[in-house]
Image: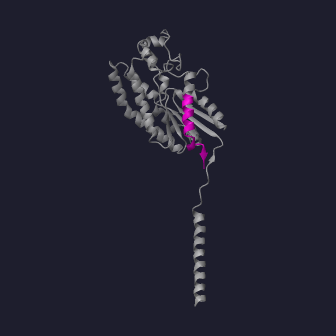
């Protein structure tokens, strides 16, 4: 009896081992561990947007931040960098999206990129400011800017959705904007607030889009006037007419980071600053793009 009981125990044990072994084999076949990520072998950088991406105002003709960030990425990561620049001066958010939808080449380059950089919003805001240039008070101008934010928010969301339809995974770095005429109208605090309002839309949009990150460049507004004391002094001395500004006969007041040609776009020093801000954000978020499966 003991021998019979012992044989039963052995048989049941062998059956149990067989079942577990078979189940483990099939589980391995159907639930294989994911391959470990590996570092990318090259960086495909796509820059798209308005005149800041085109590089207007850059005396060194490096396509603004686009050429500079290409050089910095090569140096920092020791990888080949292929950069495609789709910057176009004057484009608003809806016009950038229209170009993406209309041009297969842009769509293809977006799909191939592993870093995307976007400049947008400056021309949207400028359009509102120019349409309301004759309003009598700063408060009335700000009210018009406020009323335009719903349209800009919608257009920006549509642009993000369109870009993501061609590339779901590459990080998107979106620049904020700055007030290019601050040093000439330092007493007009409302203009800074208007720019910040649109910047807030850019920043908030990144919280609704996967792997989207905001790059702050608002300090270009102040240029070399980096302290409260300097800005206060500027407020008391910088009020000039737009006609005088455009005639190039104004005083020595100027922004060291903004082009003296148009008093609007960054100069080479300004683009250097934009590049430093962008590189810092790219390095902070490299975990989301440096590896691929």
Residue 55 makes an appearance in the image: no
Q: How many marks?
A: 0
Where is residue 232 drawn, in percent x and y?
42, 16
Q: Residue furthest front?
A: 2
Colour scheme used in the picture? one colour
Residue sitting nearer the eye, 155 or 5: 5
Where is residue 12 drawn, in percent x and y?
57, 80
Residue sitting nearer the eye, 100 or 218: 218
Q: Residue at x 60, y 71 (%)?
A: 21
Placement of 27 over or under 138, stated as above or below: below
Q: Quadrant of the N terminus?
A: bottom right
* Among the 4 quarters of the image, the one containing residue 282: top right
Where is residue 146 drawn, in percent x and y?
35, 29
Where is residue 148 drawn, in percent x and y?
37, 30
> In screen coordinates, is 265 left or right of 239?
right
Region in magenta: 274-293
The stretch drawn in magenta includes residue 290: yes
Q: Main secondary structure of the magenta part?
A: helix
* Among the 4 quarters of the image, the one containing residue 157: top left
Q: Residue furthest bottom?
A: 1
Q: Residue at x 51, y 40 (%)?
A: 163
The stretch drawn in magenta includes residue 147: no
Residue sitting nearer the eye, 205 or 87: 205
Placement of 243 over or under 4, stated as above or below: above
Q: Residue at x 60, y 31 (%)?
A: 69
> In screen coordinates, is 144 left or right of 55?
left
Placement of 138 over or under 82, stated as above or below: above
Residue sitting nearer the eye, 22 or 111: 22
Residue 216 makes an appearance in the image: yes
């Amino acid at each position: 009896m003991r021998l019979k009981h012992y044989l039963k125990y052995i048989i049941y044990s062998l059956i149990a081992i067989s079942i577990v072994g078979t189940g483990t084999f099939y589980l391995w076949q159907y639930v294989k561990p994911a391959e470990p990520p590996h570092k990318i072998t090259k960086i495909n950088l796509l820059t798209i947007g308005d005149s800041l991406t085109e590089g207007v105002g850059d005396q060194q003709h490096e396509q603004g931040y686009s050429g500079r960030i290409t050089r910095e990425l090569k140096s920092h990561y020791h990888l080949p960098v292929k950069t495609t620049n789709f910057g176009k001066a004057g484009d608003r958010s809806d016009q950038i999206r229209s170009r993406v939808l209309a041009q297969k080449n842009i769509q293809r380059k977006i799909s191939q990129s592993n870093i995307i950089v976007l400049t947008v919003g400056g021309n949207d805001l400028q359009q509102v400011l120019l349409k309301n240039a004759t309003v009598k008070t700063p408060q009335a101008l700000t009210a018009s800017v406020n009323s335009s934010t719903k349209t800009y928010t919608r257009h920006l969301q549509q642009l993000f959705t369109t870009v993501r339809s061609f590339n779901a995974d590459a990080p998107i770095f979106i620049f904020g904007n700055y007030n290019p005429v601050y040093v000439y109208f330092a007493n007009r605090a409302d203009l800074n607030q208007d720019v910040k309002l649109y910047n807030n839309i850019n920043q908030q949009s990144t919280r609704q889009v996967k792997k989207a990150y905001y790059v702050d460049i608002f300090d270009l507004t102040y240029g070399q006037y980096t302290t409260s004391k300097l800005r206060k002094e500027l407020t008391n001395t910088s009020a000039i007419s737009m006609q005088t500004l455009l005639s190039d006969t104004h005083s020595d007041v100027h922004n060291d980071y903004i082009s003296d040609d148009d008093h609007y776009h960054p100069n080479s020093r300004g683009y250097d600053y934009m590049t430093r801000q962008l590189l810092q954000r790219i390095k902070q978020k490299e975990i989301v793009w440096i590896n691929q499966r």
